[in-house]
Amino acid sequence: MLPLKEKDKPIVQKLLSAGCCARCVLRFCCVTVQAAFRQAQHETLKDLRAFIADKETSKVQDSTGQSSTCETESQDAALSESDADPPCKRAKLCPTTETVQSEGGSDALENVESRVCVVCLGILQGSCGPDLAVKIAETVKAKNYQFDTLVLSISLPAQLCVREHSCWLHVKKEVRAKSLVLDKDDIIQVKEAFKWIMQGLVTKELGGVAVVGKSPFEVGMEFTHPKTESDCHFLAKSCPDCFKATKNKQSVFTRMAVVKALEKISDTRFLQMYPCPPVEPSCSCTLQDIKCLHVSVFIAGRYNKFCRSLPQTPWVIDGERRMESSVEELIAAPILSAFRADGRPFAMELLNPHRSRFGRAEMKQLQETINKSSDKVRVRDLQIVSREAMSRMKEGEEEKTKTYTALVWTQRAIEKEDISFINDIKELTLDQKTPLRVLHRRALAIRQRVVHSMNVRFVDSHHFYLGLKTQAGTYIKEFVHGDFGRTKPNVCELLKTDADILELDVESVDVDWPPPIPE
Amino acid sequence: MDCVEQSDADAEAPSVIDRYFTRWYRADMKGNPCEDHCILQHSNRLCVITLAETHPILQEGRTVKSINYQISHGCSRLNNKVSGKSKRGAQFVTDFAPLCRITCSDDTEYTIYSCIRGRLLEVNENILETPNLLLQKPSTDGYIAVILPKFEESKSITESLLTREEFEKVVSKRSLCQPS
């Protein structure tokens, strides 16, 4: 028995005759009992018909049997496209399902079942069920992911909103019974009903894996229905400001835009422009490929670079590689294939990993693999971190300090006074325009950065090692040679000579992240 | 000994320009004799427009009286506002677009041209404050402007420019032609 009340009867009748499937009818009646959705459709339909025919729920029947019959008859007369003929309903003095069926209702039943629902376009009919669960399970197993739980997500065509709105208005306008207040927000969403139906079935197919509301592993299904895509187009005429074309979007009629427009449009206007109830579709929705997506895993660690000519990232110009390898490739390659100092902290985001569980021992092993693969780079403290920790690290880039050593060449000979002059400088604020060497890929801006302190180690009259402690984000090379005068002040200005930087080493990055892992 | 050391030091350390840039030249800009421009092309395809050593402004002990980036009634290169990574809002310049006009102490006036096509990223405002930079360091601190050519055109823009060797040939021919 379905958990329906007397007040739901007019809704059920109206929707069935409009061409809604049994499950959509349940949705409009705000049924929250999941089992009602899970039972076979034809059973639900049977129950609904029985419910309409059933007099037991009606209090009126007991005292005023005749008048209630008359009421029913007049209501029946109002039904125009009813599958079950009025004669059939008139015979409902005997409220049993058998009566309905024997009156030729079984033909009508089958008819309804084969017709595609005008609201859900078949998604809650044939498109979901054990067959789909098998398909999902096969896809997930084939892609070989490592996961404990999964979450189902479905993407529905936008016109479903329009059709649902139409049916809601259909119900609203026809049934004006006093106790009937159907708020559009109370209607169970197609997505929810779909998940109620599918979750248990998928769990069974995957041998008990819990299908939950939120999970790092997502199985996504996209349904499309090209034939009814034009259902949304009239909204662009009545609410043009909801549909702004942008470069990225293929179609202007996104779900969000359609929902917004439906909120704005008045009932009368909607009814002028769109059929109520909606027109029956000729076919069901099509399911696009099932997509699997695992949430990103973040790895962090510290590294040291022991080779001057090794670039941080792959250096490729016009498709031609300029330098063999790079820090990024040496560290990332073993990690990517495994996941599916005091040094410099680094972090990487691994997109859609098929494997995500790594124990401490395995991380250590991975670290060893990287360190053995090349003598140019060494990694330590390799660990999995959270997305929040990543963003904190990025914030830290601005606030923290870094220590460098630079080998500086000067055109004029350096005197003792110059050395003490540099050593005495504290908290020097620089105005750095975006250096020319990165200006092609960064915005033009002036950045203020602080050089906290410096110290000079004399090499010869034209060379010295310059130790610097600076705010993170300071361009050291430009501070030394001045970058065409675009970094001020600079070493050339300070020492009143041409100067250039020959070598630059990072001594330390004064940030206590990621947490060290004992050897 | 000191002189040798100094020249060694100079020789050992290639300058920022040599390390990152290729020098290209445009001689006798717009038919004006010796108004030579030097375009420093960075390996990342950005170009810095500068005066070549042979430019009249840098000769005969001239000093700069004024530099004007207002090149026409409606256009000042100082109004160039560039935003974002894609450098939106930048004035687009072509080969013969004027960048600025420089007036020297002897009232000779020279126009400096873009020499290449692309987005004008910035003009050197330091030389407005300190015109001397132009004379003392024409290749670095005294630069005129920075231009970013279109990605597709980054190679082709140099087709109409002279390499260092070609430019030096042009210059040496001039001294041959000069009356003694």
Image: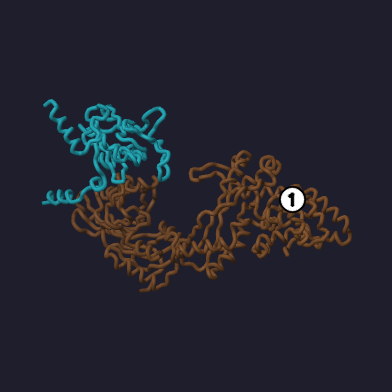
Quadrant (top left/top right/bottom left/bottom right) for the N terminus of chain A: bottom right
Q: How many marks?
A: 1
**Where residue A80 appears, x then y in whole percent?**
76, 47
Q: Quadrant of residue B62?
A: top left
Chain represented in cyan: B
Secondary structure at numbered mark 1: loop
**Where residue A382 appears, x then y in whole percent?**
38, 67
Nearer to me, B60 or B123: B123
Name the residue located 71 percent from the left edge and 41 percent from the top edge.
Answer: A268
In the image: residue A154, left or right of residue A279: left
Quadrant (top left/top right/bottom left/bottom right) for the C terminus of chain A: bottom left
In the image: residue A70, left or right of residue A38: right
Residue furthest top in the image = B179
- What's under tag 1, amino acid-wise? Ser
Q: Quadrant of residue A3?
A: bottom right
Nearer to me, A322 or A96: A96
> Quick one: label 1, few (<14), some, or many (20+) residues within 10 Å?
some
Q: How is the image coloured?
A: by chain
Asked if residue B62 is positioned above or below residue A467 in the image, the reply reads above
**Where residue B71 appears, x then y in whole percent?**
36, 30
| Any part of residue A488 in sight | no
Q: Chain of mark 1?
A: A
Q: Colour of chain A?
A: brown
**Where residue A154 appears, x then y in whole percent?**
56, 56
Q: Which residue is mark 1?
A: A82
| Any part of residue A1 in sight | yes
Name the residue located 35 percent from the left edge and 55 percent from the top edge.
Answer: A451
Nearer to me, A218 or A499: A218
Name the residue located 27 percent from the left edge and 63 percent from the top edge.
Answer: A376
